[in-house]
Every structure is written in structure tokens, then in C-alpha cells.
Image: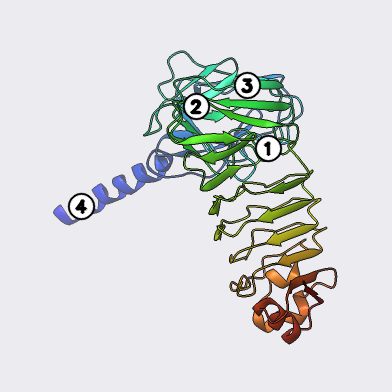
């Protein structure tokens, strides 16, 4: 009798588990109107939106379950949306390399449910209340235009906050900002200058370019500033994406003190033709997708800049910086000429690997 009772209890527990799976773990994708979503631990996560509403409302609940997450790319490539209203329970919005709500160029305003504990909006711009350092600017709508002054209580600017805001012309960073994510202004093709309050303890602006307070790290270069640029002589590091998506820059000079360039610092600079290297610096994928790059000038005889090998050069003319040693012939570019002093390491590399080389006086 006890044996049979144990079997019945086991079957009952199994049955309850099956009918309540979405309460404890992620379920399969579901659809509600124009939203595709799934349920994770009893809460709804939005996966995609396919509608054409001008004023999009993210609901508080779907089928009685709280909507808490908008996954990366869930709302993208939508030309209809002009405003978004976030529901009461939204607590996480994920972004990707193209930011939050990518390629939704007509969004002018984001509003938030008054009882939401995680987000709020001001003048249509979205802010996160729960960042550890304090209030964070999370998303600036691509449809807004002109100059923008970040509010004085903001501590953090997320890396995806302003991506592809093509109507933005200038930004003013207040003294309160303590952290700026990887170039949040990439793809802002009309951005002429980035201003910083003099009282800011972490950052400063030099000629409209964003640097750390000491002037040793270049954080962001405005896309509409100039076609030719020499990095300030005291700069030692260039942060990731600092020049990314610049459609105006044609030549760049790296001074002697620059020893570190982070990932994709110059990626997708579609008009960049010339790089001048005055010091010693490692190059791997920082110039990814620069199809017009044709001249590399190396002024330091001992510059062992070709020290990291990586085949991550899709769409880039500068094949010599991105090749695996065993795939040299396959990745070598015929469009690039290396300029360096006679007897330099760069010359030796070029001669050994049959790369076009010209001696520099």
C-alpha cells in the first residue's frame, strides 16, 4: 500500500511540474499581438516586436505575468515608432553593438510608467535608476536633434546610449559623470564637439575631443570634427571604438606615447586612408572595416607594431595587420604600402613577407 501511494505521489508531482514549467524555467517562444516573448521564472521577456504602432506601449503584463525584460534587438529596424512607453515592471533592457532599439530612427521620446522602480525619463531620454555608481543615461532617442546637455545628477553614460544619433550636433557632459562607456557617440555623424564641465573630476574636453582628466586616454572623437587629426602628444591609450563609424576621417597620426589601442578603436572608418605611427604600438583588429586604408607610415625604427596576428579583417584593406602567420598569402592586401625607416623591423617584416615597402627619410 505504501509503495503504491509513493508512486501516485510521484506521478502527481511530475504532472504539476509539467503544467507549471514556465513558472520556474524558460519556456518556448509565445506570441501576444505583435510581440514574441518567452516566460522565464514566471516573468515575461520580450524577444521581438513586429508591429507598426507610432506610439508603442510595452505592457505591464502579458497573460497575467509581469513583463520585466526587453532582450537585445527586440525592438529594431522599425521606421514607424515615434514614442515608446515602458511598463511598470520593466527592469532590464539589453543592448548590442548597435545600442538600444537599433535603427529606430524616428523615435523621439521614451516615457516610463510612474511606478517603475528601475527607469525614468526626462525630456524623452531614458535613464536607469539602478546603476551601482548612480543614475545612468541609458538611451538617447535617434529622432532627437541638435545639442544636448546631460542632466547634472547623471553618474554614468552607457556605451550604447547615443549610437547612430545622426541628428545630434553637440553634447555637454556635467561635473557629476564618473564613467563613460566605450564611445557612446559612435555613428553620430553630425556631432562636432563634446563639451565637459571644468569641475568634472574624471574627464575633460580638448578641442571638442573627450579625454580622461589626465589627458592620457582618448575616449571619444566626434565624427564631424575634422578629416585629419593628430592625437595629443600626452595620450598613451586610445579606448575601444573611440573613432568608430567615422565617415569623415582620412588620416590619423599616433604620437610616440601611444602604446595601447583598444579593440576596434578605428573600426568602420570608411574614408581613412593613412596612418602615421611615431612610437611603438600593437595592432590587431583596431582598424577593422577600413576599406580605403592604403598607407601606413612607421617613423620608429624599432617599432614592433606587427606583433599580434589575427584574421579578423573582413572588409579591411590593411591585410598585413590582420593575418595569421600561416595564412599570410591569403590575407595579404595589394593595396597597402608600408612606409618605414631603412633597417627597421617594419622593413624586415615587409621584405620577408613580400609586402609593398618604401623607405622613408
- Asked which quadrant contains residue 302, the reply is bottom right
Figure check: 192 above or below 266 = above
> Percent position (x, y) of residue 143?
71, 24
Element under disc 3: strand
Q: CA distance from mark 2 to mark 4?
A: 74 Å
Question: Could you tell me if the residues under marks 3 and 1 are in contact, i.e. CB atoms within 8 Å?
Answer: no
The residue where tag 4 is placed is 6
Q: Residue at x 47, y 42 (%)?
A: 214
Q: Is residue 319 visible?
A: yes
The residue where tag 2 is placed is 198
Picture mark count: 4
Judge depth for marks 4 and 1 and give the one in front: 1
Q: Residue at x 85, y 68 (%)?
A: 335
Element under disc 2: loop
Judge depth for marks 3 and 1 and give the one in front: 1
Judge depth for marks 2 and 1 and give the one in front: 2
Q: CA distance from mark 4 to mark 3?
A: 68 Å
Question: Could you tell me if the residues under marks 2 and 1 are in contact, i.e. CB atoms within 8 Å?
Answer: no
- 282 to the left or right of 316: left
> Percent position (x, y) of residue 90?
47, 27
Disc number at residue 139? Answer: none
Figure check: 293 above or below 154 = below
> Percent position (x, y) of residue 278?
65, 62
Say which of 7 and 315 sits in front.
315
The residue where tag 1 is placed is 222
Q: Which quarter shows the C terminus?
A: bottom right
The residue where tag 3 is placed is 148
Of the image marks 3 and 1, the number of the one nearer the N terminus: 3
Of the image marks 2 and 1, the number of the one nearer the N terminus: 2
Amino acid at each position: 500500500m505504501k509503495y503504491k501511494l509513493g508512486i501516485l505521489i510521484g506521478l502527481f508531482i511530475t504532472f504539476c511540474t509539467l503544467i507549471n514549467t514556465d513558472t520556474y524555467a524558460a519556456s518556448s517562444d509565445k506570441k501576444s499581438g505583435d510581440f514574441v516573448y518567452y516566460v522565464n521564472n514566471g516573468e515575461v521577456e520580450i524577444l521581438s516586436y513586429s508591429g507598426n504602432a507610432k506610439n508603442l506601449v510595452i505592457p505591464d503584463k502579458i497573460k497575467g505575468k509581469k513583463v520585466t525584460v526587453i532582450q537585445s534587438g527586440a525592438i529594431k529596424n522599425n521606421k514607424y515608432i515615434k514614442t515608446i512607453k515602458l511598463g511598470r515592471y520593466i527592469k532590464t533592457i539589453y543592448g548590442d553593438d548597435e545600442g538600444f532599439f537599433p535603427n529606430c530612427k524616428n523615435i523621439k521620446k521614451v516615457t516610463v510608467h510612474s511606478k517603475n522602480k528601475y527607469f525614468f525619463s526626462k525630456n524623452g531620454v531614458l535613464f536607469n535608476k539602478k546603476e551601482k555608481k548612480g543614475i545612468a543615461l541609458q538611451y538617447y532617442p535617434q529622432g532627437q536633434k541638435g545639442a544636448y546637455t546631460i542632466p547634472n545628477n547623471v553618474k554614468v553614460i552607457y556605451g550604447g546610449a547615443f549610437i547612430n544619433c545622426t541628428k545630434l550636433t553637440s553634447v555637454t557632459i556635467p561635473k557629476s559623470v564618473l564613467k563613460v562607456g566605450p564611445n557612446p557617440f559612435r555613428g553620430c555623424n553630425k556631432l562636432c564637439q563634446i563639451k565637459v564641465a571644468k569641475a568634472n573630476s574624471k574627464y575633460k574636453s580638448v578641442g571638442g575631443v573627450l579625454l580622461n582628466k589626465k589627458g592620457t586616454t582618448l575616449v571619444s572623437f566626434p565624427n564631424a570634427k575634422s578629416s585629419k587629426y593628430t592625437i595629443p602628444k600626452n595620450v598613451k591609450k586610445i579606448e575601444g571604438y573611440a573613432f568608430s563609424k567615422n565617415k569623415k576621417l582620412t588620416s590619423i597620426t599616433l604620437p610616440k606615447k601611444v602604446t595601447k589601442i583598444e579593440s576596434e578603436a578605428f573600426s568602420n572608418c570608411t574614408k581613412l586612408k593613412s596612418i602615421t605611427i611615431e612610437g611603438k604600438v600593437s595592432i590587431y583588429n583596431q582598424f577593422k572595416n577600413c576599406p580605403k586604408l592604403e598607407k601606413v607610415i612607421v617613423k620608429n625604427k624599432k617599432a614592433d607594431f606587427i606583433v599580434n596576428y589575427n584574421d579578423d579583417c573582413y572588409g579591411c584593406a590593411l591585410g598585413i595587420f590582420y593575418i595569421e602567420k600561416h595564412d599570410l598569402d591569403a590575407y595579404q592586401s595589394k593595396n597597402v604600402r608600408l612606409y618605414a625607416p631603412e633597417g627597421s623591423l617594419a622593413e624586415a617584416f615587409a621584405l620577408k613577407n613580400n609586402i609593398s615597402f618604401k623607405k622613408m627619410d
